[in-house]
Image (spheres, rainbow, N blue to C red):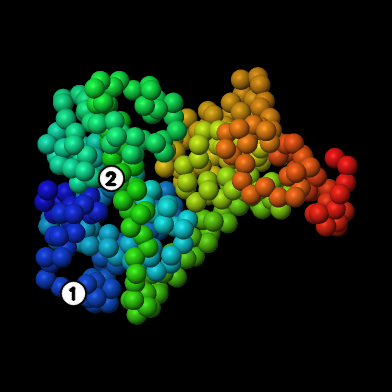
Amino acid sequence: MDVFTFAYFPFVNGAVKYVEALDFKLEELFSERAFEQVRERGKERVLSAIGEGIKKSSHPDRIGAEKELLSYPVARILVSCINDGYLTRRYALAEAKSAYESVKELSGEELKEFAGEFNITAVINERSVILHFTDYIRYANVIHEPKWKLVNRNMEHGMVTLTKEDFSRIMEEAVRKRIESSLPVDVPAGICASLERYLLEIREALKTRKSEFSIEEFKEIMPDCFPPCIVHALSNAQAGVNLPHSMRFALTSFLLNIGMNTEGIMELFKVSPDFDEERTRYQVMHIHGATGTTYTSPSCATMITYGNCYGKEALCERISHPLSYYRKKAWILKKGKPAGIKENI
């Protein structure tokens, strides 16, 4: 790989070594006027991650490619200075999705070299990629569409055959895991202070993003009345955690049952690592009754069966359904009575 390729894949080992070999001190990157455009691009990467995603940019010359490459460590420092779990997950996902678009354009040898960065030994054919099932499971286990289950894949003698596009999706997940697991990094207070004007803009954007799709905006909904299992699922969804299908169904059906609109629910899942707008919209509308059947959220017994019961509390012991919890908690709050009071349900 050369600097033009490193600009698209700044997280690979070769890119790190290239940056280390450049003739400047790391501290200069965060303070010197010569690197102002690099810092601005680093800030833009983070803001784009909070927004609609990091767009692929072209680099007509070596200087432009190096600026793009150097903006990546700046972005990592900015994310680390803020040290917010939601931002970290969203940033890692955005970088991974951006990389996915570039991975799809790699030649066979380039793709093999890229896979090697993640200790994946792959056989690259003209139309397919073959890899060991352990490498497949390592990255596909968080993708919850049925086709990604190992039992639904073509496997012979422990080797799994994928299309190049599906293998690129595996590599996207590998990138996301590498970036997310490496953040936050330890940043000296002085560097964070020197970047304060960039951090202020990012914090404002992050605050806006977090509040933009907050459930509190739906006046008919009482988030204080959500059962612990739904609070757990909701916080994970908003943090970019890839929910299991059963929990995603439970969360979606619950929110629809209590009156949240479909667009609000769509936004909740946009930060999911395997988000697909068309498929998600279909699933939400299906649960909402587009095909004639409106689904009710699963009972407590079903939630327990699928391992989706979290944070059980006193009120949970006296109800059998998340919707019952919601209605009971709403009644308690409206009456101004303590949550522990015993009432017939």
Who's the residue at 47% across and 48% down the image?
240
* Residue 248 percent location from the top left of the image: 55, 37
Q: Label 2 amino acid? A: Ala
Residue closer to the observer: 151 or 283: 151
Report whether residue 198 is seen: yes
Label 2 or label 1, whichever comes before in sequence order: 1
Who's the residue at 24% across and 31% down the image?
132
Name above or below for residue 63 compared with residue 321.
below
* Residue 4 percent location from the top left of the image: 15, 51
Residue 337 in the figure: left or right of residue 72 = right
Who's the residue at 22% across and 72% down the image?
26
Residue closer to the observer: 131 or 280: 131
- Judged from the image, the secondary structure of the residue bearing numbered disc 1 is loop
Q: Quadrant of the C terminus?
A: top right
Residue 312 in the figure: left or right of residue 341 = left
> What residue sits right under mark 1 in the picture?
25
| Identity of the residue furthest to the bottom in this view | 190
- Judged from the image, the secondary structure of the residue bearing numbered disc 2 is helix
- Mark 1 burial class by Cα count in 10 Å: few <14, some 14-19, many 20+: few
Real-space CA distance between mark 2 and mark 1, rounded to the nearest whole angstrom = 27 Å
Residue 114, labelled with which disc?
A: none
Residue 218 in the figure: left or right of residue 48 = right
Q: Label 1 amino acid? A: Lys
> What residue sits right under mark 2 in the picture?
99
Residue 156 in the figure: left or right of residue 86 = left
- Mark 2 burial class by Cα count in 10 Å: few <14, some 14-19, many 20+: many
| Marks 2 & 1, CB-CB < 8 Å contact | no
